[in-house]
Structures are given as C-alpha cells and as structure tokens.
Image (cartoon, rainbow, N blue to C red):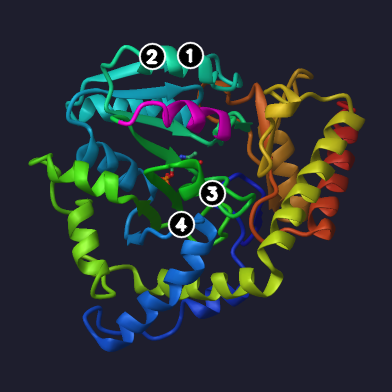
Amino acid sequence: MSYKLFIPGPVAVSDKTYAAMTTPVVGHRSPDFVELYNAVQPGLQKLFYTKDPVYISTSSAWGVMEGALRNLCRKKVLNCMSGAFSDKWNDVSKRCAKDAGALKYDWGTPLDPEDIRKELSTGEYDVITFIHNETSTGTMNPIEEIMAVVREFPEVISVVDTVSSFSVLPIKKDELGIDVMLTGSQKALALPPGLSLISVSQRALDRAKELPDRGYYFDFHEFQKNHEKGMTPSTPVIPLINGLRSKLGDIEAEGVENRYARHHELNELVRGWVRQHGFQLLPPEEFGSRSLCCVRNDRDIDLPALNKTLKERYQCVIDGGYGKIKGQTFRISNMGDETKETISALLDQLTEILGEMGKL
Ligand SMILES: *Cc1c(COP(=O)(O)O)cnc(C)c1O
C-alpha cells in the first residue's frame, strides 16, 4: 500500500526524483562520476552559504554526526541537549569514548546562549554540538545568538546539525562561523534516506589532523583528498546523488528565496490550524520550527486511531510523537515539496477525522 508521508522525515519523494534515481549507475572512479560530483557542488555550496567543500557521505546523518566527534574532539565536547536527537548525540559522544559534557534542557525549551557562554568559559571544551532544529520537539534554536557566543571561543569547533532545517530557511554557514554543518537527504530535501551532506571548514580540517584515531569511513581528510578529485572515499550511493542533482535543479528553478517563503507560508498554515482548533505548539511560539509543527496532545487524542483512519481513508500519515513524548504530542511536517493545496487538504482531513472522534 502506498501512502503519503507527512511525518518529519522521511518525507514524500516526488516521481521526478524517483525517476532521476533510475539513471544508470556509472563507475565511481570514472569521469562520468566526477562530472556528477562536481555538478552538485555549486548548488550545495549555495544552500550551505559556504566556500568550503560539501562532502557527500553514504550514510544517514548519524554517520557524520558520530564522525564529526571522532575527527574533532581531543579534549571534551559540550553536547547541548533538548530533545531526542540532541540527547542521543551525548550518548554517541560517550560511545566514542569522548569526555562529554551535557547542557540539558526540558524538551521543547530552546537553548539559552548565556548558558552556553557559561559552559564554554570553563575552558574545558574544544568542540560544541547543537541541533538547529530539534525535530523531536519541533523547536528551532536561536542559531545566530548561539553562534555569536561560540565565536568568542576560538579553541571551540562548532558542529551544527541542520538535518531538518536545511533548505527550509537560510542558514549561513560561513557568515555565522559554523565549522561543521551537516544535513541528511530524507528531511527537507525530500530525497530518500541514505545520504548525508557535510561541509567542513579549514579550521576543522586542521583540528582533525591532530586526532590519530579518526577512523576511515568518516575521516574528514579522506573526504577532502577525494573531494579534490571530484570523488568520494568509497563507493557512494550513486542513485541518490542523481536524485540530489535533480532536486538541486528543482530548487534552482523554484528560486531559493521562493522556497523559503513557501515553507514559511505552509508552516503558518499549519500553525493557524493549530490555533484555530485550540491546540498549542510544544515549544514557545517564537521558537517553533519552520519545517514542522509539534503539537501538544492535551485532548487525549488516540493518535494511532487517528493515523489509522487517515491512512485508510486518505492514504496519508502524520507522526504520533517521538521518543519520550510519543502519544503526548503529534507532528505535522511541511518540508519538501508540499504546497498550499497538499497541506490544506491534509488539515481538512484532520479536521474531519478529529471531529468524528469528538476531539474538536
Ligand atoms: C532525522 C534527524 C537525525 C537523524 O537522522 P538519521 O537519518 O536517522 O541518521 C538527526 N538529527 C535531526 C535533527 C534529525 O531530524
């Protein structure tokens, strides 16, 4: 059974993207691959707002999230934690045998730059990780204010997860001084899962040189060495790179500013529905994500039942909450290729079903 995903990743993939992915595979050391690799660089650098290279990793985002720690942390990493993904990054740091500090917040609470300044002022840290858009709670952290603080500490390398905000709004890597910025394919880029993108500064490459145990698969210097030849360290998932090339073409055709405006408008549409029906976002409104809405289920809606009807009647699926707030929240994504028509239709369907369930 085929149905449409309105969960915050993976999101619906267009027929055009799927078709691009059936382009016949070429040898990954051939001139044809070099052409493909080099063709996606300018579009990626534009979306990352960077002059640094953007490496293509055949892994989901966690691969490069773990890899970044192994490349960069000699002393101690500060993991800012406020949701399922950012909490897990602290766990992953420890599993990599890194000394890992935890700056913890309640889920749905945005990071406070002042707390980060206090922590970094201890001088203990040489890496900080944070998530721009904590997908599990639909919270968008104040990245500009956070980076202004991080820039006060030249020894600290910043690693920023933009997995679910990349291409939804501008995130200016170089201007903000982000050393390592990463994203995945299956969120706002609306590609199938399996690819991650990571842009690494010279500062971060220099740091990586100091770490003898950075492994092979996610070694920044392996990426860099191959990047200079228009290649990846090992055989990449070439169909996804063809999909990416097609998607970058779509973004160029839409116009990146139009894309940002569309996501903002669709997000407002969902927020309007939330307000109209007396629901509330989990985070404070001004920190609400622009790529999804995480809504408090304070009406005891049977979310599996809601999804079952939505799926059977309209072949659509939303998310019934993630991690420890499963059931207490539901999430609606406005990432990827969604339009006013598709989002409005979904909201009408939710209104109808929730009405029948006596929850509106
Ligand atoms: C989805 C997501 C991840 C994890 O991505 P995988 O593709 O499962 O590795 C990490 N961070 C954020 C913010 C995400 O939304």
Residue 236 higher or lower than 109, as above or below: below
Between the C-alphas of marks 4 and 2, the distance is 28 Å
Q: Earlier in the sequence, mark 3 or mark 4?
A: 4
Residue that numbered label 2 is attached to: 119
Q: Residues within 10 Å of mark 3 (few under 14, many from 20)?
A: some
Residue that numbered label 3 is attached to: 172
In this rendering, would 103 be left or right of 101? right
Disc 1 marks which amino acid? Asp
Residue 336 higher or lower than 137, as above or below: below
In this rendering, would 287 be left or right of 11? right
Q: Earlier in the sequence, mark 1 or mark 3?
A: 1
Residue 189 higher or lower than 207, as above or below: below
Q: Which residues are magenta?
A: 144-154
Q: Which disc number belongs to residue 50?
A: 4
Q: Residues within 10 Å of mark 1 (few under 14, many from 20)?
A: some
State the image coordinates of residue 81 (x, y, percent, origin top left): 45, 22
Disc 2 marks which amino acid? Glu
